[in-house]
Amino acid sequence: MDTEQEAVRRVCWRILPLLFAAYFVAYIDRVNVGFAALTMNQDLGLSAEQYGLAAGLFFAGYVAFAVPSNLLLARIGGRVWIPIIMLCWGVVSLCNAWVVGPSSFYLVRLLLGIGESGLYPGLLYILVMWAPEKYRVRMLMLMILSTPFSVMVGSLISQPILLLDGLLDLKGWQWLFILQALPTIALGLVFWLALPEGPQAAPWLSPAQKQWLVGQLQAERSQREAVQHFRVVDVLVNPVVWVIAFAGTGINAAAYGLILFLPQIIHGLGVSSAMTPLINAIPYAIAAVVMVFWSIHSDRKMERNWHAAIPAACAGIALVSCALLRDPVAILAALTFGITGVFCYVAVFWAVPSAMLTGPAAAAGLALINAVANVGSFVGPFFIGWVKDHTGSFSLGIVALGFGPLAAAVVAATLTSVRKFAQPAQ
């Protein structure tokens, strides 16, 4: 095996599992509230609107602290900063088990968002430091694969945990938060011990592999900077960055509106509480498989725009079509189509800004895009909860969420600047 292939193989086996695991536990900690809500809302006296507000407040903290968190990451390094924030949000997630009403629930969700704010753009920043561009979408896809995988696994393990109701005088939803927060705290230590500061410091790369990888990454950075060099301040006013961010707003509104309410939507279709988590796993299992093949196809074609636009358009059409459907199986199929399209879009389109930005500008730019996009993550859950309380149905809320992916599809297909930056450096 030549030096390049072996270096990439070792990065995949040593770095990607850490990134995958970190995002896996983060996603479990942010979306397990959707399963807890099946019984927690009644115990705490929460309306659908209050639950939606609390679910969305996670992203208020997330948005407010994303850029500062990632500027700190660029200054002190991922090996130190990522474990610190993992410990913080793990402890806060544990506190979910002892909320007593809307106010305390709001506070914990806000603090959880602050704790997790630096993770996703931070992991993207680490990936840029390790992954050559021609391999990056596949590596990005494998990291993002943790999202549907975590929801799928969370669905399967939440049901037996909820059955612990009454053990040690704790409710099932309290056990859910406790048992799913502890792995996050433990993983913080593993991350600190296992992640080198950079390729040059990796003990598991040979001198020849280090030389090739460091040289390749530096050459790609130099080539991008020769075309257009971004300073941090440039990123904050660059129109392309903002258009990408606003496209992400519509995608995230749909993604989190569905993720955080899907268990309740499924339950409302006549599925029992015991079976709801199991049915909930199906759309994410399908999304995980499809996004793998879609991302590989994008890499082989070296094309990003249409590989983002097509699944986004399909997701939007599927969600809007829910207004015309009455059969529960057909509705579940449309929701599955919508979730799959959203994840396929995300797996491909995040390669655009990561190829466009370098150095500290990458940390700030990725954080800015992620922060603005997550305004949609706040709006989506709050809006669908508000609609449910005022109409007695989730239908209109789901339809409204469909317009976000449709707008993202238009951006991906038509933005000339995005096409320019989406191509990997030669």
Image (tube, grey):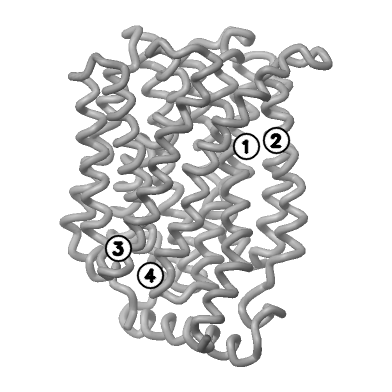
Distance between mark 4 and mark 2 Cα atoms: 34 Å
Find residue 298 and name its label: 3
Q: Residues within 10 Å of mark 4 (few under 14, many from 20)?
A: many
Q: Under tag 4, what secondary structure?
A: helix
Residue that badge 4 annotates:
355
- Quadrant containing the C terminus in the rendered view: bottom left
Q: Earlier in the sequence, mark 3 or mark 4?
A: 3
Q: Measured from the top left, where is residue 290 in percent x and y?
A: 35, 48
Residue that badge 1 annotates:
112
Residue at position x 31%, y 47% in the image: 246
Q: Nearer the viewer, mark 3 or mark 2?
A: 3
Q: Under tag 2, what secondary structure?
A: helix
Discs 1, 2 touching: Cβ within 8 Å: yes
Q: Residues within 10 Å of mark 1 (few under 14, many from 20)?
A: many
As displayed, is residue 220 above or below residue 235? below
Left or right: residue 98 versus residue 393 is right
Residue at position x 57%, y 90% in the image: 211
Residue that badge 2 annotates:
92
Type of amino acid at the residue the image marks with label 2: Val
Considering depth in this image, is 119 or 329 the residue closer to the camera? 329
Q: Can you see residue 421?
A: no
Q: Under tag 3, what secondary structure?
A: helix
